Image: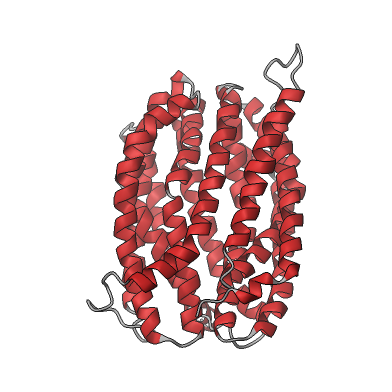
């Protein structure tokens, strides 16, 4: 009970042993990210098992477009997390209250933008990406429902960022677990019982996200011992809103760049046909779980650095960076090992087609070595963002994705074309991704050790 109580309490990162505080904060967030990943994974499993491999390909093809249009939520969430953590570390209650109030306003604005933009561009973009006719209508239906129900997605993502900034990663986890279980039941009900197909999994996801968002809002309202929430704070304040946007824009742009790169690579992937598209979906779903420790520790390092920079404790930032990075590498190595060991079983959850399973297992093996490198990249980038330097990770990400991953993907595929493989070697898509991870990690290390991020704290 004491352990659960500690996990549920907001974490003050400015005192105590750094690695213990980082781990205490990361554990519920890692579980939460695993639960979040289950949303897409369960969707894929249900449509793959009950509708077919083409439906599985449709859900996967829609993914990059969803990620592109929610980059606005990601940016605001990161900006909120950084500003909230720094104001909390500096014990500035007034500034913290204004920041949280403006987060709520930005949620409403961003939701309206996504609902309109997403609906307008969906089908034209799918056609431009050479989406096969056999899955085009399914992709369109899935995306329309996702964008029409964007409110739940935006409220959950941004409010969970605020909660993380306040040091509370456990509450969002509990609500996400509830929503994930609801999502599973709704998936089965809409798809298996009602026969709604791809549209059913999209509707189930939206309902579940809305439930988790309501719980997050309720939790935030109960944390008013740390800040004030009333009408005087829930109104537009240019200074605090721009702080959130300024710090969040680089992360939002980074997400947009990543999504654009995924879309460009998806266009190349589509040329290999429905079977490879489906195998790619399976691989990326398992890849999502392999990347979760990196993402979780990276976010934890953002909060750790933000609170300690706000408190002027740069000595703890350096100490925590070393300890947190070692932890992330260890956990990532263990999870990657398990994925390699049980690869056939994991891939078999999505389809009964053995050929798809074999392709997916081979692809994940290509990426295995890159996951440990990404643990280093995510942790060091998280520290830089938490200190207020969100631009450097953004530029590195742009270089890594557009300058390396996309260029190498098209180059390697082109160079591998033969009379036997007129479209090129599909494995080159994953070799290019591995190269991008390794190069991106090397560049991140270089800029981190230069130390310019130490001068970026908000005033």
Above or below, 134 against 74 in this view is: above
Q: Position of residue 72 (x, y in %)?
A: 42, 53
Quarter assignment of residue 378: bottom right
Which residue lies most toward the left here? 231
| Residue 167 showing in the rendered view | no
Query: Which residue is found at the position 75% from the left and 43% from the top?
Result: 435
Quarter assignment of residue 414: top right
Give whichever of 387, 302 is nearer the camera: 387
| Residue 6 showing in the rendered view | yes
Give whichever of 75, 363 is nearer the camera: 75
**In the shown orientation, is residue 243 left or right of residue 144?**
right
Above or below, 23 against 289 in this view is: below
Above or below, 84 against 272 in this view is: below
Query: Which residue is found at the position 50% from the left and 50% from the top?
Result: 38
Q: Position of residue 196 (x, y in %)?
A: 33, 33
Q: Position of residue 371 (x, y in %)?
A: 71, 52
Give whichever of 362, 382 is nearer the camera: 382
Q: Position of residue 307 (x, y in %)?
A: 55, 80
**In the shown orientation, is residue 103 left or right of residue 287?**
left
Query: Which residue is found at the position 36% from the left and 85% from the top?
Result: 94
**In the shown orientation, is residue 220 left or right of residue 251?**
left
**In the shown orientation, is residue 339 left or right of residue 458?**
right
């Amino acid at each position: 009970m004491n352990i659960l109580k500690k996990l549920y309490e907001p974490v003050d990162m400015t005192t105590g042993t750094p690695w213990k505080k980082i781990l205490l904060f990361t554990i519920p967030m890692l579980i939460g990210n695993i639960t979040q990943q289950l949303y897409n994974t369960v969707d894929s499993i249900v449509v793959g098992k009950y509708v077919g491999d083409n439906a599985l390909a449709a859900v996967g093809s829609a993914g990059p477009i969803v990620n592109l249009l929610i980059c606005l939520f990601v940016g605001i969430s990161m900006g909120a997390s950084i500003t909230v953590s720094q104001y909390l570390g500096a014990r500035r209650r007034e500034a913290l209250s204004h920041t949280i109030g403006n987060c709520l306003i930005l949620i409403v604005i961003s939701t309206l933008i996504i609902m309109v933009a997403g609906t307008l561009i969906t089908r034209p973009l799918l056609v431009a990406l050479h989406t096969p006719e056999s899955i085009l209508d399914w992709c369109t239906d899935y995306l329309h429902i996702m964008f029409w129900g964007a409110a739940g997605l935006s409220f959950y993502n941004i409010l969970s960022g605020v909660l993380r900034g306040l040091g509370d990663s456990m509450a969002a986890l509990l609500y996400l677990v509830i929503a994930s279980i609801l999502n599973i039941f709704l998936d089965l009900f809409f798809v298996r019982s009602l026969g709604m197909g791809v549209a059913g999994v999209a509707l189930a996801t939206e309902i579940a996200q809305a439930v988790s968002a309501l719980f997050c809002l309720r939790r935030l309202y109960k944390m008013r011992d740390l800040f004030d929430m009333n009408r005087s704070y829930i109104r537009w304040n240019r200074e605090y809103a721009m702080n959130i946007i300024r710090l969040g824009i680089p992360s939002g742009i980074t997400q947009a760049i990543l999504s654009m790169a995924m879309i460009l690579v998806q266009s190349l992937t589509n040329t290999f046909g429905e079977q490879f598209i489906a195998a790619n979906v399976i691989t990326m779903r398992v890849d999502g779980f392999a990347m979760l420790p990196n993402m979780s520790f990276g976010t934890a390092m953002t909060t750790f650095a933000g609170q300690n920079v706000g408190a002027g404790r740069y000595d703890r930032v350096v100490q925590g960076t070393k300890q947190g990075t070692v932890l992330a590498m260890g956990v990532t190595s263990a999870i990657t090992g398990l994925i390699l060991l049980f690869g056939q079983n994991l891939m078999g959850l999505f389809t009964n087609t053995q050929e798809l399973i074999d392709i997916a297992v081979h692809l994940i093996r290509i990426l295995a070595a890159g996951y440990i490198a990404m643990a280093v990249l995510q942790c060091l980038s998280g520290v830089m963002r938490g200190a207020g330097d969100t631009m450097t990770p953004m530029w590195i990400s742009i270089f890594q994705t557009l300058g390396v991953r996309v260029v190498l993907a098209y180059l390697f595929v082109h160079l591998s074309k033969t009379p036997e493989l007129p479209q090129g070697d599909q494995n080159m898509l994953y070799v290019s991704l591995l190269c991008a991870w390794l190069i991106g990690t090397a560049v991140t290390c270089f800029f981190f050790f230069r130390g310019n991020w130490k001068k970026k704290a908000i005033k």
